[in-house]
Image (spheres, rainbow, N blue to C red):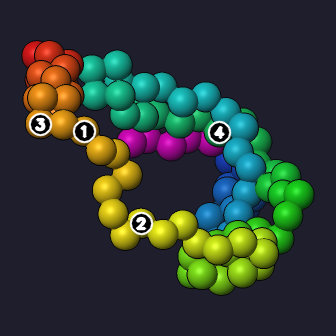
Amino acid sequence: MIVSFPPELADDVHEALRGQAQFEGEVTYDPATATAKRVRLRGVSPPVPLPFDAEAFWTPVSTQDLAAAQGVSPAALDGPMVHLSDEEWDDVADALAQLDG
């Protein structure tokens, strides 16, 4: 992918690559591969602050800890969530096969 920007943005771009930033510009996509082929930057600015603690958002938390923090119990998945007859399972398999082809 080609990324281009005017020389006056060089310091801002290099600084932004070391942390979080908001970029303004144009992206050219290849419709055949749905991938970005070129990015033309017009501006770099600090990121918009999130309305919550972003560091805490990315901190791994167990299901049990999340449930306890919300005062609920984790869902118990000790059995099937759907009870279908063999005929109903066949119907589901047929419907999925039709979607595939």
Q: Nearer the viewer, residue 87 or 67?
A: 87
Q: Nearer the viewer, mark 2 or mark 3?
A: 3
Task: Tell me the quarter of the image containing the C terminus.
Answer: top left
Tell me where the magenta segment starts and ends, as one range.
1-6
Residue 52: x and y in percent read 85, 64
Q: Is residue 28 left or right of residue 92?
A: right
Dot placed on the residue nearer the N-terminal end, 4 or 3: 4
The structure residue drawn at horizontal position 48% and vertical position 25%, both measured from the top left corner, is 28
Q: Secondary structure at mark 3?
A: helix
User: According to the image, label 1 marks what residue?
Assistant: 84
Looking at the image, do the residues carrying marks 4 and 3 touch, with CB atoms under 8 Å apart? no
* Residue type at numbered disc 3: Asp
Q: Secondary structure at mark 1?
A: loop
Dot placed on the residue nearer the N-terminal end, 2 or 4: 4
User: According to the image, label 3 marks what residue?
Assistant: 86
Specify the quadrant of the image occupied by residue 91: top left
Q: Nearer the viewer, mark 4 or mark 3?
A: 3
User: According to the image, label 4 marks what residue?
Assistant: 41
User: According to the image, label 2 marks what residue?
Assistant: 77
Q: Is residue 5 magenta?
A: yes
* Residue type at numbered disc 1: Leu
The structure residue drawn at horizontal position 70% and vertical position 45%, both measured from the top left corner, is 23
Dot placed on the residue nearer the N-terminal end, 2 or 1: 2
Q: Nearer the viewer, residue 20 or 9?
A: 20
The structure residue drawn at horizontal position 12% and vertical position 36%, both measured from the top left corner, is 86
Distance between the alpha carbons at the discs numbered 1 and 3: 7 Å
Looking at the image, do the residues carrying marks 1 and 4 touch, with CB atoms under 8 Å apart? no
Residue 44: x and y in percent read 76, 49
Distance between the alpha carbons at the discs numbered 4 and 3: 57 Å
Q: Secondary structure at mark 4?
A: strand
